[in-house]
Image: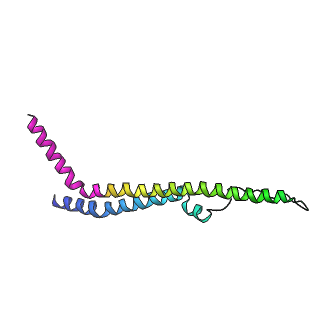
Amino acid sequence: MFGLISDYTKWHYSYALVAIVHLAQEFARFFFNLFSVGLFLRSLFSPIFSISLNDVASPEVSDVVAVFMGGVFTRIIGACVRTFFILVGLLSGVVSVIVFSFIGIVWILLPIIFPALIYVLGVVSFSLL
């Protein structure tokens, strides 16, 4: 009987707690990869799509200005879209770490909470009689 309790305590506070920490890391890594946080940080100001100047012998000045302004505009759009996805990815990772921190705290306190809950429910049920 005592071997079972000591084995459970050893598993509960060592192996399972380490598994919860690894699971939290995997969730954070998943959200960073899902929203491509690293890739979007490296290519933040890259254009979202490219407008090329036609192969004309002497392009008009207005064509050059239009291509330049189009490139600036697409870089701004690309930076806004990438920033949105970076923020969503970081927020998702932070939320997952917060949730798993709460789960870890509950997991640590579970051997205390569960018997106390059973005791309280028993006292309440006996007081109703």
Position in image of residue 42 (x %, y %): 60, 65
Q: Hey, which quadrant is residue 96 in on the image?
A: bottom left
Q: Is residue 120 magenta?
A: yes
Q: Hey, which quadrant is residue 14 in on the image?
A: bottom left
Horizontal side, residue 55 vs residue 119: left or right: right
Q: Hey, which quadrant is residue 125 in on the image?
A: top left
Which quarter shows the N terminus? bottom left
Q: Is residue 91 magenta?
A: no
Q: Front-most of 27 and 35? A: 35
For image coordinates 71% across by 55% down, the residue present is 49
Q: Front-most of 36 and 87? A: 87
Horizontal side, residue 17 vs residue 41: left or right: left
For image coordinates 18% across by 47% down, the residue present is 117
The colour scheme applied to this rendered structure is rainbow
Count numbered badges in the picture.
Answer: 0
Residue found farthest to the top = 129
Q: Front-most of 109 and 47? A: 47
Position in image of residue 86 (x %, y %): 54, 58
Above or below: residue 117 compared with residue 11: above
Which quarter shows the C terminus? top left
Bounds of the magenta segment: 105-129
Position in image of residue 58 (x %, y %): 90, 62
Position in image of residue 89 (x %, y %): 50, 56
Residue found farthest to the right = 57
For image coordinates 49% across by 56% down, the residue present is 31
Q: Front-most of 111 and 5? A: 111
- Give the prevailing secondary structure in the magenta stretch: helix
